[in-house]
Amino acid sequence: MKRSLIAAKLGSFVMALLVAGCGIGTSASVTTAPRSPADAAASTASPPPSVESSTHVLSDASDGAIGITVTVPAPGWSGPPGGWAMEWLPAGFDPPAGAGIIAFVVDKKFYVYGDPCDWRSTRPDAPATTVDELVAALANQSSRNPSAPEEINVGGYSGKKITLHVADDARFRDCDGGHFSTLGVAGEDPALYAQGRGEIDEIWIVDVNGRIVLLEGGYYAHTPQHAVDELHAILSSATFD
């Protein structure tokens, strides 16, 4: 199972992966299935554009969304300006050595599944409405081997981050819809699901003037350390408009 980081659009905002959710090729391609089922029609056979500048607009604040700008410390990352996602071009976001980033801006409407495999029957009735509620729900998701939440400050706004894992022996084909899913949003289930087994998902969540911004960075045990370091630098550099 694969997904595109570049072709996603969710409700009034575009998603494409910061990604890390869940092989290797000589260049990234968007012929894979997108992270969001609603975005399948947006996929193309063309490689995503490479980031040409050290300053990259992850979100252009269109349709009332929060603008997000990041600094890219090294070449090798791709993503359309304003496309809500980036991926590491040498390997894309796929296992066993890919990396990516995706951004979500949702007004208090994140639904964290109790079980990422049996996600249809474990979708909560009420969404997480604060940073703390969202982190707590992620920490309690079954089979994710979560890290302890950490306090963060990104772009002058406080929040928390947590690292989740996909087991090396996860059986995606046995999951609802074939997706190992982290969360949904209003009108979109699932909205974020894994690219492959062994995926490591760092989820950074900040409150920007009462609106939750979720940045997910994903990678694998075999992702080169410099790519992981670059991913962390990109996430840490985010500013919000």
Image: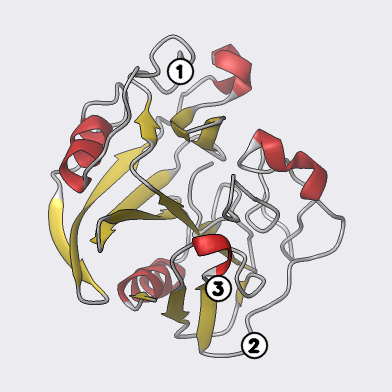
Q: Which residue is mark 1?
A: 119
Instruction: State the residue in front, 35 or 148.
Output: 35
**Residue type pointed to by label 3:** Asp
Instruction: State the residue in front, 10 or 117.
Output: 10
Q: Which residue is mark 3?
A: 60
Disc 2 from disc 1: Cα separation: 38 Å
- Looking at the figure, which quarter contains the C terminus? bottom left
**Residue type pointed to by label 2:** Glu
Residue 159 horizontal side relative to residue 202, left or right: left
Of marks 1 and 3, the one in the foreground: 3
**Residue type pointed to by label 1:** Trp
For image coordinates 58% across by 51% down, the residue present is 12
**Residue 59 coordinates in the image, percent (x, y):** 52, 69
The disc label shown at residue 52, or none: 2
Residue 209 horizontal side relative to residue 60, left or right: left
**Residue 28 coordinates in the image, percent (x, y):** 72, 62
